[in-house]
Amino acid sequence: MITRRLILALSLLAGLSATPGPALAMQGDPIYNIRYYSDATYTVEVGFDQGACYYFGAGYSSHTGQSTPYPQYELIGYCDRGIWNPI
């Protein structure tokens, strides 16, 4: 006779085997460098934010120049609990 505990244990094992492994795991937070431009033509760069990886996730290590409403984002990697994974 199958007991309730055996059914519960088998269902838990089936659930664990269905979870994705490391190959399908998330890569972490995206890290971007941001370039700021003077206007919508994106020809004159006036500012820059350097992307960085910290224990709490993605952030920025430095800012130079101005911030404007005309940014362009460059994906440079992913941050997973303080570990930087370049692309």
Image (cartoon, helix red, strand yellow):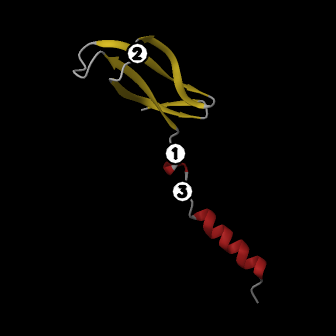
Disc 3/disc 1 C-alpha distance (Å): 10 Å
Q: Earlier in the sequence, mark 1 or mark 2?
A: 1
Q: Residue tagged by mark 3?
A: 20
- Where disc 2 sits, the SS reads strand
The mark nearer the N terminus, 3 or 2, is 3
Question: Does 42 sit above or below residue 26?
Answer: above
Q: Which quadrant holds the C terminus?
A: top left
For badge 1, the amino acid type reads: Met
| Point 54% across, 56% down: residue | 20
* Residue at the disc numbered 1: 26
Total numbered labels placed on residues in the image: 3
Location of residue 18 with respect to 29 vertically, above or below: below
Horizontal placement of 87 versus 82: left or right?
left
Secondary structure, mark 1, is: loop
Location of the N terminus by quadrant is bottom right
Q: Could you say where residue 48 lies in the image, as x and y percent from the top left?
A: 40, 15
> What is the residue that sits farthest to the top in this orientation?
65
Q: Residue 40 appears at what percent x and percent y?
A: 25, 23
Mark 1 neighbour class, 10 Å CA radius: few under 14, some 14 to 19, many 20 or more:
few
